[in-house]
Amino acid sequence: MRQFSSRAVLATALCLFLLSACDKHAADAQAAPVKAGASDLAAIGKAAFFDPSLSASGKQSCASCHSPANAYGPPNGLAVQLGGPHLDRAGLRSVPSLRYLRSVPYWTYTQANSLKERLEDGDNQPIGGYTWDGRYNTPADQAAFPLLNPDEMANTSADDVAKKLSQSAYAQQFRDAFGQDVFSRPAQALADLGKVLQAFQFNDPSFAPYSSKFDRVLDGKDQFTPAEAHGLALFSDPDKGNCASCHLVDKGAHGSHPALTDYNFQTLGVPRNMDIPANRNPNFFDMGLCGPLREDQAKQKWFCGMFRTPTLRNVATRRVFFHNGMFHTLEDSMRFYVQRDTNPEKWYPKDAHGHVVKFDDLPKNLRSNVDIKTQPLTNHLGGKPVWSDSDIRDVVAFLDTLTDADAKTVPR
């Protein structure tokens, strides 16, 4: 949640344009050797998405964590989902929704050549990529991670996956698409599985229905209530919530509807969640862009603590929020934003001397990475939060309008 310099805005726009073109060319290049059309690949991908036999437990599919009934997000209020061979192993991060991800740009971070320009353009942020840390550039690339992760579907190797695929109800369709000998080439079969899962996510309309009240209002077919309109105003006001600086609400080129994210990365200092078993080790820290799951940016210390800005579409259907699932209601998530620095004692633990330990989910030497320069994160201890409880209710009323017609908001 920050304000951009004009240079950063221009750079980001150019980046998005170029990366979208690259994404199209990359997708075309990947599809070239495939013998099936997009609809055939999507049909195979749909079958695989709902297939629990692809997991070590035989009970977990992609849809187990990315539930269609929950806007392809988690079906429960667990901070992290359980997986593994016996469905008793906890992951590290909350499960994001898979809706509205078609336009995610490739992960990139660009800097000016001179130190002077870099200092002047200090608000330039990394952008894009799939997952909370952006380490995959396509869903096809990302698919292997849950399939092989011991805390998720827990296959031990590509050979494991290929064997399961060869015994699936759609095995022949898979052979027809990728070659009759595809299962004798496990690494290629795993990559091809990623392609069909991507085809399903990119081509099935259920992943981007644009059927919310917000969309109807954008098209002039509905109107916000006074509470919803006030909530949007607070959400967009750069001197109040300033949410729209990252969760874009305006129409794009040719009237396209926004995804409610700019795909950039932020360091918000969300409190440590002790419901995640890994966090019970005081020496473990999930630092997003600089590890532990992503390794290529480990030397960029100012990246530590950064996580990609998620879409807020269907956010009112969720029961866990932020990368670590720390909060379980929209109201608490909103309160944290506006009270993090005015009332830190509400959100962070105290040490043995009674001092509040802010930003406790980062090592001490990296806590200065947390954003304290943009509204509403500029307020100080004892100050007045920019939103009252009444304001928060109106912001939540606006967020309710982002729920698609086939999804339900969480009762409050």
Image (spheres, rainbow, N blue to C red):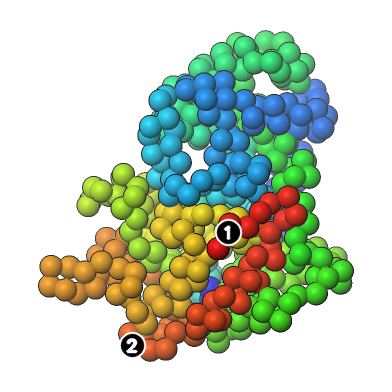
Seen from the viewer's position, the closer of residues 386 and 265 is: 386
Is disc 2 surrounded by few (<14), some (14 to 19) or many (20+) residues within 10 Å? few
**Quick one: label 1 or label 2, which is nearer the N terminus?**
2
Residue 312 occupies quadrant: bottom right
Q: Amino acid at mark 2?
A: Gly
**Residue in view at x 62 percent, y 21 percent:** 189
Quadrant that contains the C terminus: bottom right
Q: Position of residue 5 (x, y in %)?
A: 58, 80
In the figure, is residue 346 to the left or right of 211? left
Residue type beneath disc 1: Pro
Vertical arrangement, residue 282 with respect to residue 398, above or below: above
377 or 252: which is nearer to us? 377
As displayed, is residue 392 above or below residue 284? below
- Residue 144 against residue 161 in the figure, above or below: below
Q: Which residue is mark 1?
A: 411
Q: Residue furthest left?
A: 353
> Dot 2 corresponds to which residue?
382
What element does badge 2 sit on?
loop
Q: Residue at x 78, y 45 (%)?
A: 205
Q: Is residue 370 left or right of residue 188?
A: left
Q: Residue at x 33, y 85 (%)?
A: 381
Measuring from the top left, give residue 229's x and y in whole percent: 70, 79
Which residue is more in the foreground, 291 or 274? 274
